[in-house]
Image (tube, rainbow, N blue to C red):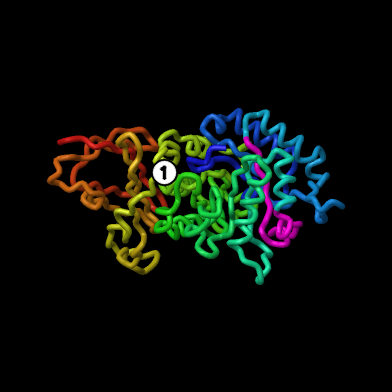
Amino acid sequence: MNVSLPPMGWNSWNTFGGNISDQLIVETARAMKEQGYLDKGYNYIVIDDTWSLHERDEEGRLVPDPAKFPRGMKALSDDVHALGFRFGMYSCAGVQTCGGYPSSFDHEFVDAQTFADWGVDYLKYDFCNFPRSANGKNRYAMMSMALKATGRPILFAACNWGSDEPWQWMKSIGAHMYRSTGDIQDNFKSFSDIARSQLDHFSMSGPYCFNDMDMLTVGMFGKGNVALGKACTVAEYETQFALWCMLGAPLMLGGDVRSMDDACRALLQNDKLLRINQDRECRPPMPVYRGRVLNTEYDPETGSWWREYPDSGLTLFRHLSDGEFAVAYFNFAPKSGEIPFIFADAGLPYMSGVGLRFTDALTGEDLGVQRDYCNFTVESHGCRVFLARLEKI
């Protein structure tokens, strides 16, 4: 288990919810291998909630639902491993899971051993139905110890939705990633609000313990378990994926990869965006601009002026390894507009005699050397992402 970089993989919840099965998991793993996802680093296949029976067995162990998983979990785990993936499962710190199934409160050590016996490599650990009298931090620490007591390396994906400011303590109790927000939905407002809420917390995310902003919805297009509100466009999915990559969040896919369209598959396998997310230094980005889109024209559709959108523009600057940088511009406003980047805000004033050579991360286009500032017009809900290098002028 290597968690020095943000984990990558696929989780069943966003699209399938409770409609999961042995067949679905095997088909998904095969599709991810055949379509190149595994080669790009997406190496975890994770089953989410509703996989068990509603009662434990006579020995107090969780039991896979035989209608969904007739071969049991060990056989499925073996198949997933044989395809080159790691196998992940789900439980919860409460007395029942979010779907109302048996959970791990007061069963931490027996459940951890059960997962280890099945060959589990990743545990998503939710926070539903948690007793008010109990201590959440202690219970996450308990499951962390239970997993380690099995002797099997298991990635601990703590999912407490941001309760008790997990960025302050999850690393200290042994978690490898931690959910910092509520559940994502497949619409622009949901994922953009989630990402912006975490801008000030990624300074505490890094190797061996990453801030998890939930599974991606790229490629769902309004179909599936979390398809609520207006479905996203391809441009909005580009913005979602670019935000997750720039912030260095885990990349857990939530769409149906078996039927993913070519544009979304190419986006999720974009080498330059993945290079940003998987940079070995794991540095957080610096927000060099947080303000309105630079456009003051009157908008007759909303009856307002652009200056009334105070947080509509965002520019992120990120130091990468090997002398490279990433720069991303995001427009959260309802229409296109200009978003600025003054280089001095990243430590590169005009008198330095040094500029930045920009390469478009989505198209590969070389935009030449920029000096002092570089503003871009960005479409509504869209983004521009660049890799950059210093160059003397």
- Location of residue 59 in the rendering, given as x and y in whole percent from the top left corner: 84, 51
User: Which residue in the structure is indicated by mark 1?
Assistant: 282
- Location of residue 348 in the rendering, given as x and y in whole percent from the top left corner: 21, 46
Task: Work out whether residue 224 can be spotted.
Answer: no
Q: Is residue 283 above or below residue 305?
A: above
Q: Residue furthest left?
A: 351
Q: Is residue 61 above or below residue 258?
A: below
Q: Picture quarter containing residue 99?
A: bottom right
Q: Quadrant of the C terminus?
A: top left
Task: Work out whether residue 143 can be spotted.
Answer: yes
Q: Closer to the camera, 181 or 184?
A: 181
Relative to 112, 195 lies left or right: left
The tally of labels here is 1
- Location of residue 73 in the rendering, given as x and y in whole percent from the top left corner: 76, 40
Q: Residue furthest right?
A: 58
Majority secondary structure in the magenta region? loop
Residue name at image x 56 percent, y 51 percent: 175
- Location of residue 91 in the rendering, given as x and y in whole percent from the top left corner: 68, 53
Residue name at image x 61 percent, y 57 percent: 140
Q: Amino acid at mark 1?
A: Cys
Q: Is residue 91 magenta?
A: yes
Q: Is residue 132 magenta?
A: no
Q: Residue furthest bottom?
A: 133
Q: Quadrant of the N terminus?
A: top right
Say what secondary structure mark 1 lies in. Answer: loop
Residue name at image x 55 percent, y 33 percent: 37
Please give the range of residues in magenta.
86-108
Q: Is residue 324 above or below residue 350?
A: above
Q: Closer to the camera, 325 or 114?
A: 114
